[in-house]
Image (spheres, helix red, strand yellow):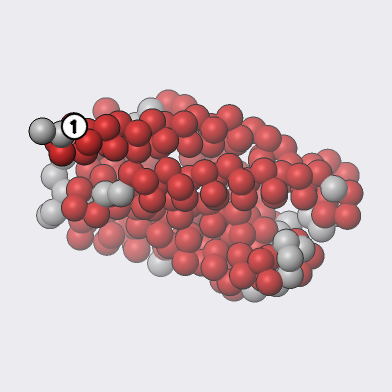
Amino acid sequence: MASLTQVLVFISGCGRYRSPSQRSSILTASSCGFMTVCSLPFFLDWVQSGGNLAAVQPRPALAETACVGLMAYMIFHLALGVLFYRRELLLGWHWIHHAIFTFVLSFAIRNHVAHYFVLAGTMEFPIYVMFVGFLEPSLRNDYLTAVTTFAFRIVFHLILLVQWCLPTNRLLVGSGINQWVPASLAITALPGHIQLCYSTVQRAIRSSKQKQALLSP
């Protein structure tokens, strides 16, 4: 079902978005929107409990469905890319990134901690805003992209990183080496999030300067 959904979403978007760069963004935008919606109950648990990871309810049906859906995106983004937008697929950002995250998602489902991964899926919201703005220029808002990227990909990310380093939270995932998986993933992803935030802020600054130049007499 998840695989069929990915194909149908892509086909439905191809009529409107014809360039390779646009077509490579169809599944990314829809997947980020899907993950954002799925993450809301888990994020609300976390917020309402004052940031207590133990208070996040498992909701296995929703959490595992979200993870399977994201896995389907990773696979079909590459498979369809080979056919329709091969030049847009980057070795690091797509092939390696998607392969690693497919294994991470499998780990989350197998170890019954998918709800924690989906909680972190809240960080997909700024990516959704970014790609919707790319596909539909009339909806582009560089300031919103920059603010949400900083709020979720930096602040929220750092809070989760610190929390996953605490012994009581590590044990929520399991014992042994497994307990270090969330913190390790957060540390590994942080440089990329910082770079992304820097890029969005720079884009917002350029956009502001361009608007000021147009308004100047």
Secondary structure category for the residue under label 1: helix
Tell me where residue 90 sits by quadrant.
Answer: top left
* Residue hosting label 1: 213
Q: Nearer the viewer, residue 42 or 86?
A: 42
Instruction: Give the quarter of the figure containing the N terminus.
Output: bottom left
Q: Residue at x 68, y 65 (%)?
A: 46
Closer to the camera, 106 or 55?
55
Judge left or right: residue 42 versus residue 215: right
Residue found 61% across the figure and 70% down from its top: 44
How far from the left and from the top, in percent, is residue 205? Answer: 35, 33
Disc 1 residue crowd, few under 14, some 14–19, many 20+, Cα 10 Å: few
Picture coordinates of residue 50 (x, y %)? 73, 65
Q: Position of residue 170 (x, y in %)?
A: 83, 50
Residue at x 76%, y 63% (from the top left corner): 52
Q: Is residue 169 visible?
A: yes
Q: Could you tell whether 209 is left or right of 176 in the image?
A: left
Residue 215, placed above or below residue 27: above
